[in-house]
Amino acid sequence: MFRIRVERLIPSDIETVFAALTDHAGYARFPGVAKASLLEPGPTDENGEGALRYIHGGGIHFYERITAYERPTRMCYRIEESKPLPIRHDLGEITLSEQGDATQVVWRSEGHIDLPLIGGLLDRLSESRAAGSFAAILDSLG
C-alpha cells in the first residue's frame, strides 16, 4: 500500500490556492503534468463534487472523480481508472487552512497498485515519485 502526505505553507491567500488546486483543466500548467482536462463538470460547480478529470503525467494516465468539494478548505478525489498501472485508490484529499497571509496545504493519497507479486514494490516506488510530484505542484504555487 502507498501512503503519501505532502505539506506546504504557500505564501498566498486560501481562495487563490484553492482555485489553483481545483481548476482541473489548468493542471497542465503544473510541473510533471503533460495534459489535463475536465471530462464531466460537477452538477453544482464545474470543478466540484461529481466532476471527472483526466490527468496525464509521468507516463501514467488518471481518471479522477471529485468526491468532496468544500470551498475553500477541502477537496477529495478518487482515481476511478489508471493506465498502464491499475490503482486501487482509497484516499485522495487536499485540505487547506489559513495561516495569517499564507495557506497551509496538506495533500494525502493512499491506495495500492493492484498487480500480483510486484504491486507492493511498485507501491513503494510510486510513493516516492508521487510525493515528489505533489511537492512540485505545491511549490509552483509559492
Image (spheres, rainbow, N blue to C red):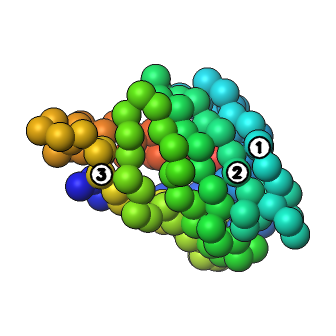
Spatial separation of the CA atoms under disc 1 and disc 3: 25 Å
Say whether disc 1 or disc 2 marks the residue closer to the N-terminus: 1
Depicted 136 relative to depicted 47: above or below: above
Q: Which residue is mark 2?
A: 52
Give the residue at mark 1.
38
Secondary structure state at the residue bearing disc 2:
strand
Q: Who comes first in sequence, dot 1 or dot 3? A: 1
Quarter of the image for residue 86 reads top left
Instruction: Indicate the secondary structure of the residue bearing disc 1.
Output: strand
- In the image, what residue type sits under mark 2? Leu
- Closest to the observer, 80 or 126: 80
Secondary structure beneath dot 3 equals strand
Residue 72 visible, this orientation: no
Q: Would residue 112 appear left or right of 106 to someone viewing this image?
A: left
Residue denoted by label 3: 112
Kind of residue at disc 3: His
Q: Residue placed at 75% from the left, 73% from the top?
A: 71
Earlier-in-chain disc, 2 versus 3: 2
